[in-house]
Image (cartoon, rainbow, N blue to C red):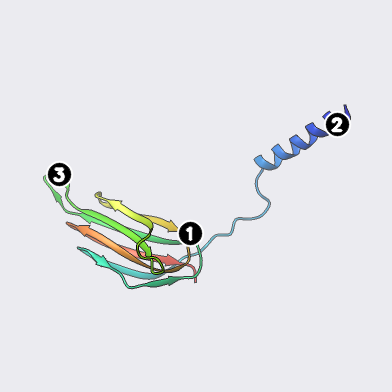
């Protein structure tokens, strides 16, 4: 009976700790603008180095609209210079007007390939210093 009571007590403590709030406050990471590009066509950026994670790529897409249909596309591919044949992330793939951000959880030296047609775009890289 003691063994069963102890098992129930341990199970209860585990459940309460799993459901309860953490006593450790979450650290908020403040990101700063590192690089920014804008344009209307295809671009490969210069390399930039990121030493902490996470970091972010934010983008805005303003495609041409013809006959009520969006006719532009924006794609942002992230590559590491150590292995340029391996895609690290697809940060954007959009034909819609708007903006968004993608987070990357790797450090190193990266570059972006921006594939765009019939759109005006802005791309920013944000990282902690």
Which picture quadrant has residue 69? top left
Report helix, strand or loop for mark 2: helix
At x 31%, y 58%, the residue is 76
Q: Which residue is mark 3?
A: 68
Which picture quadrant has residue 124? bottom left
Report helix, strand or loop for mark 1: loop
Q: Marks 3 and 1: in contact by CB < 8 Å?
A: no
Q: Residue furthest top?
A: 1
Residue 73 against residue 12 in the figure, above or below: below
Circle nearer the viewer, 1 or 3: 1
70 displayed left or right of 75: left
Task: Give the camera-side residue of 72 and 105.
Answer: 105
Q: Residue furthest right?
A: 2
Report helix, strand or loop for mark 3: loop
Circle nearer the viewer, 3 or 2: 2
At x 66%, y 54%, the residue is 24
Q: Is residue 7 visible?
A: yes
At x 70%, y 42%, the residue is 17
Q: Which residue is mark 2?
A: 3
């Amino acid at each position: 009976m003691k063994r069963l009571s102890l098992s129930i007590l341990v199970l209860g403590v585990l459940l309460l700790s799993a459901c309860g709030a953490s006593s450790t406050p979450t650290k908020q990471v403040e990101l700063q603008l590192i690089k920014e590009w804008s344009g209307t066509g295809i671009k490969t950026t210069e390399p930039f180095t990121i030493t902490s994670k996470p970091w972010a790529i934010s983008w805005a897409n303003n495609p041409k609209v013809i006959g009520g249909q969006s006719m532009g596309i924006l794609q942002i591919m992230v590559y590491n210079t150590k292995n340029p044949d391996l895609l690290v992330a697809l940060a954007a793939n959009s034909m819609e007007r708007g903006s968004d951000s993608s987070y990357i959880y790797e450090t190193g030296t990266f570059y972006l390939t921006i594939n765009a047609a019939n759109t005006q775009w802005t791309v920013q890289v944000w990282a902690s210093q």
